[in-house]
Amino acid sequence: MISHYLSAQSIEGMVVDQADQNALENASIVLLDTDSIMRYFTRTTPNGKFNFSKIEKGEYLLLVTYPKFEIYSQPLHIENNTVDLKKIGINSQSNLLEEVVINQRIPIKIKGDTIEYDAGSFETEKNAKLEDLLRRLPGLTVSASGEITAQGKSVSKVLIDGEEFFGYDPKIAIRNVRADAIDKVQVYERKSDEAELTGIDDGVRLQTVNVVLKEEARSGIFGNANANIGTNHLFDANLFVGKFNRSERLAVTGNWNNMGNSGDASRIRMNNQIIGHPQHKNVGMNYENNFFEKKLHLTSSYNFSNNGMANESANYNRRILNDNQTQETTRESTSENDNRRHTLRSRIRYRIDSISNLNIRLDGGKGRQSSASTSSSNTLRNENIKANEFKSRNNSESDSENMNLRLDYRRRLNKKGRSLNLHLNTQTDNTTSNNQVNEQTKLYDALGIIQDTVIVDQTRLSENKSNNLGAAINISEPLTKHLNLTLGYNFNSSSRNALVNAYDNDANVLILDSVYSKNETNDAHTNGMNVNLNFHSEKLNINLSNRTTHRHQALADSYRDIELSRNFWQNNLNANISYRITNNKNLNIGYQNNTNVPSFSQLQPIQPPTNELYRQLGNPNLGRETNNNISFNFNKFSLLKASSFNINANSGFTKNAIVNRSIIDTEGRTTTTFVNIQDHINWNGRIHANYTRPILNGSVQLGPFTSAQFSNNYGYINGDLNRSNNTNTQIGINSNKQNSKNIDFNVNVSLGVNNEVNSIQKELNNTAFRSSANADLKYFLPFKFSLTQVIFYSYTGKSKVFPDPIRQFYMNLELTRKLLKDESLLLSVKAFDVFNSFNNTNRSFNNNNFSETQQEMLTQYFLIGMKWDFNKNLGKKKEN
């Protein structure tokens, strides 16, 4: 015992005012470990001294805080018996030369590969939601439609305490969970579900946001209800109710409107142009609970949606063919559709005993779709010679159902770190449809004289069935304290049947038209071996995995006398290195190599035509393509400045790429097939960087960003090989303030340029500029009034086909008045596209193909509505 105390490590020092060297009494001294968790705490004595004794060896971060002084931090490596830090001088806030955020809480931490934000360090308006909080976090942006981007990467999952919350729509979580109920927000890249369950890294990474609730927020009732009515007989109604207990969570949501946008119709920040005549209904429920003394955890959600749309559109398309030949198509169309869908998702985690766990996932869905459409088009060759005319009138009804069951069993074996994982999944899909097709195609010769008229008047009965069965076994073995090996085998078998019976309606008896029909079976069997090596230490994590698979494919069609059989070897190599440079710096590098085999839709000699103007041919000699991808990610944050910096990049290379090769004849008919690019490599690259820091005493978050994308791709333009180089660069800045004083705002401004260079048809090479500005400003007025102003502007430069640029502008306004003592009831008047100035023209181009589309759209309208936010106990600390 005496020798233990004599050899125990200790830290001592003294804290003084840097300006006059006076001792600072009761300064807080904190030692954080490598996971930013407080391990030791003390305060300075009246003479400014402090001492830690019996400190374990290791890496620490020393924090010194004192009211109205800067936060001092210093990494420490504790190895010797005593560490004497002498005098630590810290500056008074009034003496600092640069802006410093003074906060007793640590706003940002890096814990391994996870960036963790302390929600209480970022101010939001009363009754704000998770969406408003995310807009405040450095490195995160939320679009008006609810898409989240973190460090320049799109977020695919939003979790609440590690669990999916309405898994079919993450927007429900960010728009209804209260900001004042949140303790922490964690951002990280998670592996795919399969990789996490099997232990075999497949290289897939999903950008994820996990929201950790406050302890007091795990019990209570909260929600909101709103209703709006407006001009043009518009209406929108939404309801959300959540009830949380310690282990049980129940939430119900519903919305109904004739404005579209999936329940977001009346949101003032949205780009709320109403396309056509939509109808939207949606009801959902999410349930989560623990059973059998927390041995079983259930998460389940149900959703019913009914979406309908009636619309009209006009399209202009121009193709530049060989030898300066052109083809121009003008098309007008109408459409009506109605889709109904029931969806059920369930997740069960069952802890069988202390060493065994069973995970069950069950997904199912059933739907019915109906549609009707008309279309008429005219195609000209070289601007004045008619090539074809096309008219169609189609009606269809279809029913679909699917089910997916997955079982994963994991058991720890007798040696520490050794485990066994068994996996089984089965999936079935079934779709039947009845299509009424009426088409008339007129074809003209090179002089513009009608050559042929093709009429198709058919009933097409279709049935598609697919079954999939998969199984896998994986064993993990610790080789050393830091090195782990996983070996596995997987098997997969799939079978698909596609039946299309086409009957001519003008025949007296039902006679099968074999040209438009098929009776196809497609079977595939794969066997794979997996190996995964993982090295982990305090700062370094290396993961190396390889999957080798043999795939056998067989296809037969009794109607078209087709039989194909192919065997492919595939290999998928993944490597990932994560290195924690310091407590606030993290580096991640990844590499992927995989092969893609051609599908039978690309291999089979011929497919049934969809209409007279398009035919797809297969290539039985098509080979596999090889892809290589390298990724890089670096994160850094400053505790003193509460700033964040991120840079990420990736580059991909494709060898023997599978590309589409289309040829358009003089009558405007397209014949397409697939070929390999054997003598060239397609490649692309992307780099993104963003920096965020608070200014003006932390009330404003400022975040400049920049990105660049490059691509060098080989493809075909009307049968001729073309090399296309594209460079796309962007620079911008976003800024936001949300402290509910005078004015809050969220502003995003960007400038960009796109340059395209082709090896053939060089006259189409083009450099186009673009810019955008999106701002929402909230003015806080007397008597509980507030005014929100949304401004959107975008500029898309001209091209060689479209000499005029596109400018789009709109402004939305919302005047609100808070009612009731707790301000939970809100009365609002909204005006969308105040100046009726939005341009609904949409353009797209690719190599030699240029399109411009306009559709029926309502941009200017007005709404009046009420919104009620209610909250009982959630996020409120209980009085003792």
Image (tube, rainbow, N blue to C red):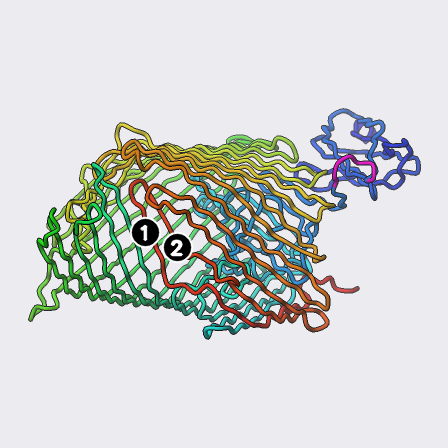
Tell me which segment is drawn in magenta. 94-100
| Three-letter code, disc 2 | Thr
Q: Which of 817 and 119 lies nearest the eye of the viewer? A: 817
| Magenta portion: prevailing SS class | loop
Q: Which mark is on residue 316?
A: none
- Mark 1, residue position: 469
- Mark 2, residue position: 841
- Badge 1, how many Cα within 10 Å: few under 14, some, many 20+? some
Residue at mark 1 to residue at mark 2: CA–CA distance: 46 Å
SS for tag 2? Answer: loop
Instruction: Tell me how many marks there are.
Output: 2
Which residue is pictured at 19% across the width and 37% down the height? Answer: 621
Q: Position of residue 672 (x, y in %)?
A: 20, 44
| Three-letter code, disc 1 | Leu
Q: Which of 843 and 70 lies nearest the eye of the viewer? A: 843
Which residue is pictured at 57% across the width and 51% down the height? Answer: 210
Which residue is pictured at 42% across the width and 59% down the height? Answer: 362
Q: Position of residue 85 (x, y in %)?
A: 81, 28
Q: Tag 2 or tag 1, which sits nearer the N-term?
A: 1
Is residue 840 rendered to the left or right of residue 222? Answer: left
